[in-house]
Image (tube, helix red, strand yellow):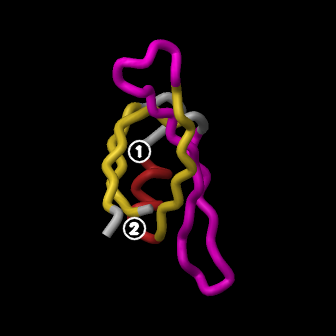
Amino acid sequence: MNNIILSGRTTTDIELRTTTTGKSVTNFTLAVVRPGAKDNTDFIPVVAWEKTAEFLNKYIGKGRKIIVEGFL
């Protein structure tokens, strides 16, 4: 498995959407600063579904530092 854990800040407010089948989904970008590299930031697209998406929409805003665990 290609498991990954990233720590960074959200670049926008989280917007919750609903699919045609009724599932909650959100897309956002996570800004991750590379350790040891001055002024070098990676912008990682993230997708969250259902309960996780609803939680993010409720509690996380722009610029909030979060840890994301998932897979590539």
Viewer-closest of 71 and 21: 71
Residue, disc 2: 51
Q: Is residue 9 left or right of residue 2?
A: right
Q: Position of residue 3 (x, y in %)?
A: 31, 60
What residue is at 51 percent from the left and 34 percent from the top?
A: 31
Q: Position of residue 49 (x, y in %)?
A: 48, 68
Viewer-closest of 38 and 31: 38
> In the image as oriented, which residue stretches furthest toward the right?
20
Badge 2 amino acid = Lys
**45 vs 62: above or below:** below
Q: How many labels sit on residues?
A: 2
The earlier-in-sequence mark between 2 and 1 is: 2
Q: Quadrant of residue 32?
A: top left
What residue is at 44 percent from the left and 51 percent from the top?
A: 56
Residue, disc 1: 59
What residue is at 31 percent from the left and 70 percent from the top?
A: 1
Q: Position of residue 16 (x, y in %)?
A: 59, 58
Q: Quadrant of residue 17?
A: bottom right
Circle 2 — which element? helix
| Label 1, residues with CA under 10 Å away: few <14, some 14-19, many ≥20 | few
Q: Are marks 2 and 1 in contact (CB under 8 Å)?
A: no
Badge 1 amino acid = Tyr
**14 vs 36: above or below:** below
Q: Which residues are magenta?
A: 13-40
Q: Position of residue 8 (x, y in %)?
A: 41, 34
